[in-house]
Structure formats: C-alpha cells, structure tokens
Image: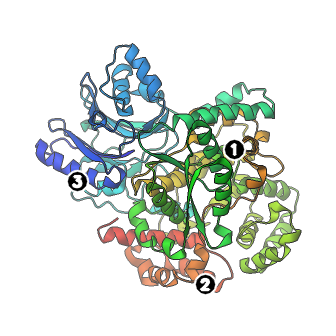
Amino acid sequence: MCGIAGFLAPGVGDASPMEALVTRMADAVRHRGPDAGGTWVDAAAGIALGHRRLSILDLSDAGAQPMRSKCGRYVVTYNGEIYNAPSLRRELAAAGAHFSGHADTEVLVEALSAWGFERALARLNGMFAFAAWDCAERRLRLARDRFGEKPLYYGWVEGAFLFASELKALRAWPGFAPPLDRAAICLLLRHGYVPEPWCVFEGLRKLAPGTWIEVSAADAGCLPTARHYYALTATIAQARSAPAPVTPEAAVDMLAETLSEAVGARMAADVPLGAFLSGGIDSSLIVALMQAHSETPVRTFSIGFADRNYDEAPYARAVAAQLGTHHTELYAAPDDALALVDALPRLYDEPFADSSQLPTCLLARLARGEVTVAMSGDGGDELFAGYTRYSIALSLWQRAQRTPRALRRLGARALREVSPAAWDRLFALAAPLLPARLAQPRAGEKLHKLARLLEIEQPLAMYLGLISQWQDPARLVPGACEPSGVLGLAAGMPAGLAFVEQMMYLDTLHYLPGDLLTKVDRATMAVGLEARVPFLDPAVVALAWDMPLSCKLRGGDGKWVLRELLARHVPRALFERPKMGFGVPVGDWLRGPLRDWAEALLAPARLADADLLDPAPIRDAWRTHLAGSENLSYPLWTVLMLQAWREAWARGGP
C-alpha cells in the first residue's frame, strides 16, 4: 500500500525542478508509504510521477516505483493490491512477458503493455488507485478500484493537472489556493462526508469508484469525463437476468466457498498480517475464515470502552477465544480518544465527520504495533442488508401506507415530548421484559429519529431522512445549492429493486466509499497499515446480488446467510445480539470534556468567518444539545469537523 502524486504541466521547465516538486508532493503523503520513495520525470512532455512505498509484496528493489514496462511505453505510480496478480502473471508469462520480481506492480505495468489500458483495467481484481503515463500517446490515465477502497484526487491548478492520494500532496503545488466548494459543503453537512466525485475545493474532484479518466496537454483547464469500466448496475442486471434457483442452505454453501476464496487471496503478504475484530457478525466471519486458512493463530485486535453502550470488547474476546486467535485488546480511556480530536483534520485531509473515526484511529494504531496488513469486515452490511435502518425504514413505510397522515404526525409529536435521556431510562427499566431485538442501546436517540421519519411521504425520502445529519443543509450555507447527491444516484438504479435493495444499492455507491472506506483508509494509512476488505471481492458482490432478499433479511433481522455461515464456526450465542455499531459517546463528551473546545469553534464570530456558514441554526442546535432535550451530536459534529479542518488548513495544515 502506498501514496501517489504527480502532475502534467507542459512548459514547467527542466527535469531537476520538476523532480524536486513531485518529490515534495509525494513526501506530503509519506505516512502512506514510509519504506521508500521514487520519482520519474519526462521534462519534454511535462510529466512527473511520484511514489511513496509501503512494502507488502516483494520487499526488494524489484518492486520500486514509479515502474516502467519492459517495452518502455507505460510508466505507472500505483497504490493498492491486485489479488489476482498470480494468475495474471502466469497468463502474461505464457504469452512471452518477462518479470524481474513478484510485485503486483510489475504485473500491472506488463498487463498494460500486453493488453492495453482498458482491457487490462477490466481484468484487475483488487483495491487500487493508479496513474499510467503512455509515452507513445503522451496521455495520462488515472483509474480507481471498483468500490472505492483507495482514494484519488485530481484537477487543474494554474495550468497544471495535479493528482494525488490525498489533498495535502496537492497543496505542495506553488500557489495552490482554490476556494471552498459551497455545494460540496452542503453534502458534507448532510452526510458527514464529501461524496465522490465532489471535493471540498472548487475545480477539484475525487475519481469515482469503478471509473478512469485520461488527459493530455491539449486538455488544459478542462476536467476530463470519467468513464466506467465497472458498474454495480451491470452486476445486478446480470444476476437478475438469470437468477440462480438455489435453496437457502445451498446459498450458505456458495457463500462459504466464494468468501473463503476472497479471504485466502487477501492473505498473501510478505509482512505480518492480522484482522480487526469487533465481535460482530462481519468481522467474526472474516476472522473465522482466516483462521481456517492459517496453520498458526491469526492476530486479532479490538478496542474497548468503559461505557457499556459502546463496549464491544467482551464480544470480540469471546469470539477470539472460540476461534483460537492471538488476540490483543486495548481499553481506551476517554482521554485517549479526545487526544485525537485535534489531529483529525490532518489525518482525514478533507472535512470528515463520522465520529467512529476516533476508535478506528485507535484500533489502527494498536494493530500497527504488531502487523502491517489488517483485514476489515466492511461491506457486509451493504451487501447483506445488515443495517437496522433497512428493516426500520421498511417497517415504517409499510405501516405509513396503512396509517392516516394526521395520526402519524400525532405519534411523532408524542415521541418528541419525551427527551432521549428519559427514553433511555425507560428502556433500561423495561429491559428485562423486552425481547432481545428491542433492547437497543441509545434507544432515545433512535426514537427521536423515528419521530422525524413518521412524517415523510416517499420511501426514498425516508431513506434520505435516515442518513442525513442536517435535514436542510443548504439553510446553513447561504447562497449554496445542494447537488442531488444520493438521490441523483437513485435515478440510475436498476428497475425492480425492492425498497431494502434500493437502500443497499445506494449505500454501496455512496456511504461505503464516501464514509466507511474513507474512514478506514485514512486511519490505517496514517500509521502505515494496509487494510483489506474481503467482502468487496467482485465475486462476493455478484453472489450477494444473485441471492434473493430472503437470504439476507428475515423476520426483521439482516444478514441471515452470514449468520448461518458464522454459526458453522462459533456458537450463535456469541453473535446473536442487537447491532451496536462502532462509536464513542460524542453526545456526552460535547456536554462534558469537549464542551469548551466545541464552544470555541461554534462561537458566532468563528462560524461567520469567511461568510461560509449561517451561525443562527447552528447555535440553536448547540443550545438544544447542551440542554439535553435532544441529542444533536451528529449534526453538530459535522460542523465542528468542518470548522476544525478549515482553521487547520488556514494555519498551513492539514
């Protein structure tokens, strides 16, 4: 895993200053590749490629980058892992290709040489973001993996086309000072992240998953149009065109084989390897399959908190004991997480406001003490209907259609009359009498969200309400117009998807790359740790969409097929419990140890600085949260992360 950077700027000058400039850009992402660095420059063409290396496969100089093909036509700087590199290597070798080492970078560059850019790209199974310079055509092409595991920013600045793994590398370009994109700020305030293809800066973009672009000197100033080499719609269409007539039991068998192969392929490494283990279904299943592939105990890592509402460590410990892993856990004090707050703008590079970024950073640091590669269970919820919001939204929508609007509004008002804290106390008292699925942590917060949803009239509007931090973010950004965002993606959905499948589809294209994969990438790469995600193997994704919804959602519970498979490895009692999530008590911290920090950032004068935000609705939300009448920590956290990032950037960071 690595960091990449570069530019296309005809007329910049001699090779020496170009090399110095691209070195500065690459060094800005040194944390992504602390083991080595390299550059390649063609001054006549105005192209410079930079690379920072985290050595995972082939630790020798044969894996150094940027790397040029044997024929001399292609030069690549590449960030990622190609899991089917061994089979591609055999095919290329049989056709006459010669290899100096066993790095997957060499497979990539020789595949480009043998098959051309588009054919080679379509055959890659992996996570990656790379730039390939075509010396013959003098064209630069950028590509990103199918689901967005690895990041790639790009855009024109002062006549130069820049690209990099992170924005901080672009800042090394002389005179880099683009204005903030107010439309992107609206998306940030709604979702807690800036989704692809938008970027927080005007004129810059993030390459969307499953796409590639090309530019040449003749394209100066024009952002290239992204072209798809992979589309989830095609995977779904193929699955629906000839659905497999399998029994539920056969579906479990098929998943066992396909997911096990994906896990095995991702265990290839010349450095120590382990896994994140929360004790939930997804991570437990990945670890179980890893252990089945390994002759020695797999190294697993978990984070615990003293607050029982957020502590998953006992579940992880029990699963680790059952599977026989070499388990390491850290019980983090609130001060451990709070100490990270000031570092978040630097770590996340672009404003990012999923508060589970805090435990994720702690977990990455813990794992990096023993391993260089860690498996993650991300993707299981999106593919197998794991989020509680799926069953909640479905149930609410079905009931809403049978309930008069006036009655729904009355119910919503009644739910809001009781504060979240009071609801929590009531649920705690009633816990011994409630079925397990209703014994939800943070019940009051969820009931207040439910109150908002009861008044919604369209199913996708209900979904948008569920995933939104601020319900009307444009009200906070005067003069801004919010892009269509996630509902714009809905226009391209395949026909015939059930409501739950529509939500899964949108989460896979929007929430997964924009939030989850971004969160894990930045947290792990900040400490030089590579994270791998077996659920996002193309074969696993295709199989998941080939299965009927009944294999995923049953009786209001998601991930049926994953549960059945996991039950073959560990007792059900270890994982059959309400979904907890991976978070920290930010709401309480904002009223306690983080109050002064937040109050300073939310001061009216600082909110009004740069004429970006309207202080009034934000101050109203802050007062409401402090009073304890409603938990508004999520929307407030988006503003706080924006403010902290903006001020850090102004000071010369992140």
Can you identify the residue that label 2 sits on? 626
What residue sits right under mark 3 in the picture? Answer: 24
The three-letter amino acid code for the residue at tag 1 is Phe
First reached walking from the N terminus: tag 3 or tag 1: 3
Helix, strand or loop under label 3:
helix
Q: Quadrant of the C terminus?
A: bottom left
Image location (x, y in percent) of residue 32:
36, 51
Q: CA distance from mark 1 to mark 2?
A: 38 Å
- Disc 3 marks a residue whose amino acid type is Arg
In terms of depth relative to the viewer, which is nearer, 205 or 372?
372
Residue 326, visible in the rendered structure = yes
480 or 179: nearer the viewer = 179
Mark sitting earlier along the chain (3/2): 3
Question: Would residue 478 be seen by someone viewing this image from the given angle?
Answer: no
Q: Which residue is mark 1?
A: 384
Viewer-proximal residue among 90 and 148: 90
Residue 574 picture location, percent across and down: 74, 54
Left or right: where 437 falls relative to 53? right
Q: CA distance from mark 3 to mark 2?
A: 44 Å
Please give the name of the residue rendered at 57% of the width and 41% of the height, measured from the top-left corner.
534
Residue 176 lies left or right of residue 405; in this view the side is left
The amino acid pointed to by label 2 is: Leu
Asked which secondary structure carries label 1, the reply is helix
Query: Crowding near pointer 1: few (<14 within 10 Å), some, many (20+)?
Result: many
Residue pictured at 42% horizontal, 59% vertical:
200
Sequence-first tag of 1 and 2: 1
Q: Mark 3: few, some, or many residues within 10 Å (few <14, many ≥20)?
A: some
Q: What residue lies at 58% left-to-right and 36% top-to-bottom?
A: 293
| Relative depth, front residue between 232 and 585 | 585
As drawn, is 171 to the left or to the right of 596?
left
Q: Is residue 314 above or below residue 601?
A: above
Residue at 22% x, 42% y is: 39
